[in-house]
Amino acid sequence: MQERPPYFLTWSAQHNARPLPVTGGEGCYFTTDSGERWLDLGSMTYHVNAGHGERRIIDAVKAQADQLCVSMPNADFPAKRLLAEKLLQIAPPGFSRVFFTLGGSEAVENAIKIARMVTGRYKLISRYRAYHGATLGAVSLSGDYRRPPVEPALVGALHAMDCYCDRCPFGQQPGSCRLECATHIADMLDLEGPRTVAAVFMEPVVGANGVLIPAPGYWQRVRDACDQHGTLLVADEVLTGFGRTGRWLGLEHQGVTPDLITLSKGLTSGYGTLGAILVHDRIAQHFDHNVLYAGLTGYAHPLACAAALAAIQVYEDDGLVQNAAALEPLLRDELTRLRDRFAPHARFVRAIGLLGAIEFDAPEDRYLALKAALTRRRVHAFVQKASRCLILAPPLCIDEDTLKLGIQEIESALAEVFTPQGDDTP
Ligand SMILES: Cc1ncc(COP(=O)(O)O)c(C=O)c1O
């Protein structure tokens, strides 16, 4: 086991936690200092969408370092301007300004501030199974297990039930569903008192908490309710953005225009630390004559801007968004095959683009056992006890053969951990 390092490991009790000594990588694989080669089915932390060792991005960052390496928040330079223009092209029509941050949490944090400044209200609605980030405002919106330890959270942060079709909190089945989960948010907006909620924050597809894919029409109903109450709608695309769901933005599947879009992760594919908020013109205009009380020393760092521009170029040149869409049926079919083989422990499969999950009904120790079995096979994927899920989110440059190979490894890990159907005779 690795020695305990002189820095904190995140989201862990430090006693038994150990880091992975990563040394580099190429495409869908990363390497460690002992020469191990790991298949990365998680894109590290759902963010290395362009894959490891991508020379085109590395070279762009190096060239930017030679040209201009430091700046200040209100400096103008080509990479920053070009990136803002590019992001506004990716956004739905009507978006006119970008606010840069250092990562996803700060994008959410500043979106909260913008929503409060624009509406003059303080309440915020998000959902229980959401993860919106680790800073105090963002974690207040996060509904999951990471919020209670740091409560009291932000005053006014309210949580709604989720669009969790496989275990519908409103007891519905696909055939009987009337989008009760969206109506529930509309009801909350009504019951909180007319015109008191600044914004509703939602991930287009709930990512790290179990890949929850909303039914068609869900976002539209929430959009309508927000419009009725003058409440802003924020799409947190930190995880779903940049091709993860087979579209540039996850919300394209729902055809709804939000007021703010938060981005990070795939924005630089991990080659720089950067987040962004795309701001619809009707919101941006507020700040023409009102001070925008927001800013960061590392706002739009030149190296991060160069990394983002190059990453987006790689997505375009290599057709990675299309690749994610093309591989979705294979991912879904293979996960469904595994679900059938490992039922009743494996219960549900959800997949969109290159984001997929198998949800289990299993005793707690099985999740740790599955994690260990994957580690022995040098496969990086997410095994999450809280959501009872195994989640896959490989780099978008993965090909069919590598994806199949990854699924085979997962199948063998599952076979080690769960008794396959029909094989339970001694
Ligand atoms: C949807 C979503 N929002 C925000 C964040 C926070 O981003 P960061 O870790 O870059 O602060 C994450 C991170 O996983 C996320 O998945």
Image: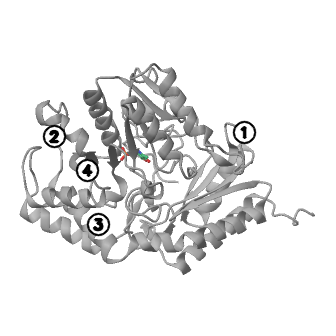
- Alpha carbon distance from label 2 to label 1: 48 Å
In the rendered image, which residue does mark 3 sit on?
311
Q: Amino acid at mark 4?
A: Phe
Q: Nearer the viewer, mark 3 or mark 1?
A: 1
**Of the residues under marks 3 and 4, which one precedes in the sequence?**
4
Q: Report the mark closest to the observer, 3 or 4.
A: 4
The residue wearing badge 2 is 297
Q: Earlier in the sequence, mark 2 or mark 1?
A: 1
Q: Is residue 163 shown above or below 188? A: below
What residue sits 21% from the left and 50% below the top? 96
**Looking at the image, do the residues carrying marks 2 and 3 touch, with CB atoms under 8 Å apart?**
no
Q: Is residue 426 left or right of residue 248?
A: right
What's the residue type where badge 1 is placed?
A: Gly
Coordinates of residue 406 in the picture (x, y in percent) = 58, 71
Label 1 to label 4, Cα distance in Å? 38 Å
Per the model, the C-alpha gap separating discs 2 and 3 is 23 Å
Which three-letter amino acid code belongs to the residue tagged 3? Ala
Q: Which residue is mark 4?
A: 95
- Residue 127 spot, x, y in % from top left: 52, 36
Which residue lies under the disc numbered 1? Answer: 171
To which quarter of the image does residue 230 belong?
A: top left
Determine the secondary structure under disc 1.
Answer: loop
Label 4 Cα crowd, 10 Å radius (few <14 / some 14-19 / many 20+): many
Residue furthest to the bottom = 401
First-in-chain label (1 vs 4): 4
Closer to us: mark 2 or mark 1?
A: 1
